[in-house]
Image (tube, grey):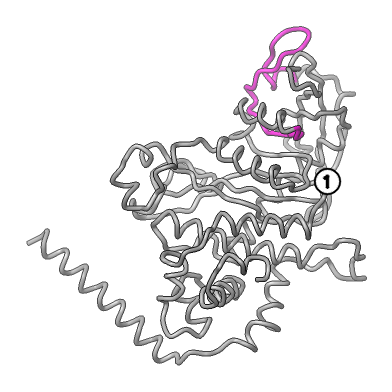
């Protein structure tokens, strides 16, 4: 809390932010302003709701403080910035950014809300760093929907790679130590993002489709056609990193692409991964300011999976996707405080130079969250009268039910 306390001018919201983050860290069955307020011992949810809607504080500045905290706690010159989006399924149409669109989380087109996230990944730790809500064109071009959701006037349509580029630029401008960027096909297929990363002198390993065109000394080829012509000696078996069930071994090959050179200099490659069991291929466009070994590119490609671990921890443990807010500001504030909570856990579990305990795995984010609740939060928190909370919930539900019936009576006989 000392990291972000300066962003809250009055002691009341400063204390409330602390209680809010403790609620996110607590093992509540469902996380929203009601359950978090009850956990904090408040008499009602109004204070927590005000924190996300009416209280004046800059969520972008708080994320900047979290970025400095991560740089101090986890800073590594060879760190990888990982970009990816995640979707939250929604039933209503009025939540900011919601429309029918493809969600990788669901694996199909659903009514959902998408956000691009940036994760800072080192060899020993990874932490959520930044997030940007994706606002589709149907929202950007509709002044009424924008006004109802509180979307600022300066917010214009931006593609997901453009949102990722802005977050990466902000991280580099703030002096965050990093060397690489990794992302999936949604970002590898955008040449403007790759060009911007070369301008920033950041190496990248970005996934591309099998139909991606590459230029060699013998002409232009699809990535899968080029892979089919590689001799057996071109493949090397390497691990993309440690997994829960062992090393993640694949067969890897790469070929230099000198004809892809531009004014930024550096070295281009096409990296190819082959599954040892199924033979399925995956392709990556790579660039680095200096010559780089295949093992380093493989390490960066493998570290991209860290963002999936971050999503899992933030959603299952911290309630990243459990918000019940429709407006632009409240979404960003909820997401910012979730990132804040995840950064605390990531820093507290970082190995640094400590050896692993004999006979134990290193302390995980989920295990630390459990210990923090049992040893720190639970013994110290105040308990509100459960009967008063029961009455408040039932009163709120009665008002909502009466409102629904009254609205129905105006439209239906």
Mark 1: secondary structure: loop
376 displayed left or right of 255: left
Left or right of 232? Residue 309 is left
Residue 276's image quarter?
top right
Does the image show residue 244? no
Q: Position of residue 232 (x, y in %)?
A: 86, 23
Quadrant, the N terminus: bottom right
Q: Residue at x 44, y 76 (%)?
A: 47
Q: Is residue 135 visible?
A: yes
Comparing 79 with 256, the one in front is: 79
Asked if 137 appears above or below 118 in the picture, the reply is above
**Magenta region: which residues?**
201-226
Question: Position of 396 compared to 354: left or right?
Answer: left
Give the left or right position of residue 369, taking residue 403 as reference: right
Residue at image location 61% in from the left, 27% down from the top: 192
Q: Is residue 107 magenta?
A: no
Tell which of 303 and 104 is nearer to you. 303
Judge the density around disc 1: few (<14), some (14-19), many (≥20) Cα neighbours within 10 Å: few
Name of the residue lying farthest toward the left: 413
- Residue 43 falls in which quadrant of the image? bottom left
Q: Is residue 210 magenta?
A: yes
Image height of 360 relative to 173, above or below: below
Q: Quadrant of residue 252?
A: top right
Q: Position of residue 68 (x, y in %)?
A: 71, 56
Q: Mark 1 highlights which residue?
A: 77
Q: Position of residue 330 (x, y in %)?
A: 45, 60
Q: Residue 23: x, y in percent?
A: 56, 75
The residue shown at (69%, 77%) is 372
Viewport quadrant of the C terminus: bottom left
Query: Considering only vertical position in the picture, is 144 above or below 372?
Result: above
């Amino acid at each position: 809390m000392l990291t972000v306390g300066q962003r809250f001018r009055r002691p009341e919201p400063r204390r409330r932010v602390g209680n809010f983050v403790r609620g996110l860290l607590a093992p509540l069955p469902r996380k929203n302003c009601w359950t978090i307020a009850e956990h904090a011992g408040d008499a009602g949810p109004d204070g927590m709701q005000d924190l996300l809607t009416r209280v004046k504080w800059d969520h972008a500045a708080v994320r900047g403080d979290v970025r400095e905290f991560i740089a101090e706690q986890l800073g590594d010159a060879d760190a990888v910035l990982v970009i990816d989006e995640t979707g939250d399924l929604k039933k209503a149409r009025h939540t900011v950014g919601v429309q029918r669109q493809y969600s990788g989380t669901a694996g199909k087109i659903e009514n959902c809300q998408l956000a691009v996230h940036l994760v800072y990944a080192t060899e020993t730790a990874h932490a959520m760093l930044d997030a940007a809500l994706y606002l589709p064109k149907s929202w950007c071009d509709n002044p009424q929907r924008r006004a109802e959701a509180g979307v600022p006037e300066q917010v214009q349509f931006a593609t997901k790679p453009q949102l990722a580029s802005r977050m990466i630029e902000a991280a580099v401008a703030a002096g965050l130590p990093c060397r690489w960027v990794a992302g999936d096909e949604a970002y590898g297929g955008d040449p403007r993002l790759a060009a911007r990363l070369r301008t920033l002198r950041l190496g990248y390993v970005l996934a591309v489709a099998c139909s991606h065109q590459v230029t060699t000394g013998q002409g232009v080829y699809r990535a899968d056609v080029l892979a089919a012509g590689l001799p057996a000696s071109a493949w090397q078996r390497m691990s993309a990193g440690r997994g829960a069930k062992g090393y993640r071994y694949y067969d890897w090959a790469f070929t230099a692409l000198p004809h892809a050179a531009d004014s930024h200099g550096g070295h281009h490659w096409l990296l190819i991964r082959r599954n040892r069991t199924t033979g399925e291929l995956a392709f990556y466009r790579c660039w680095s300011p200096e010559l780089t070994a295949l093992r380093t590119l493989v390490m960066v490609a493998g570290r991209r999976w860290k963002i999936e671990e971050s999503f899992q921890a933030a959603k299952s443990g911290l309630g990243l996707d459990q918000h019940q807010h429709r407006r632009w500001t409240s979404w960003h504030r909820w997401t910012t405080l979730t990132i804040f909570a995840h950064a605390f856990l990531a820093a507290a579990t970082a190995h640094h130079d400590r050896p692993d305990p004999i006979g134990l795995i290193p302390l995980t984010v989920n295990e630390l969250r459990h210990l923090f609740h049992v040893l720190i939060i639970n013994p110290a928190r105040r308990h509100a009268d459960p009967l008063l909370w029961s009455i408040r919930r039932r009163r709120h539900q009665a008002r909502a039910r009466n409102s629904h019936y009254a609205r129905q009576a105006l439209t239906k006989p």
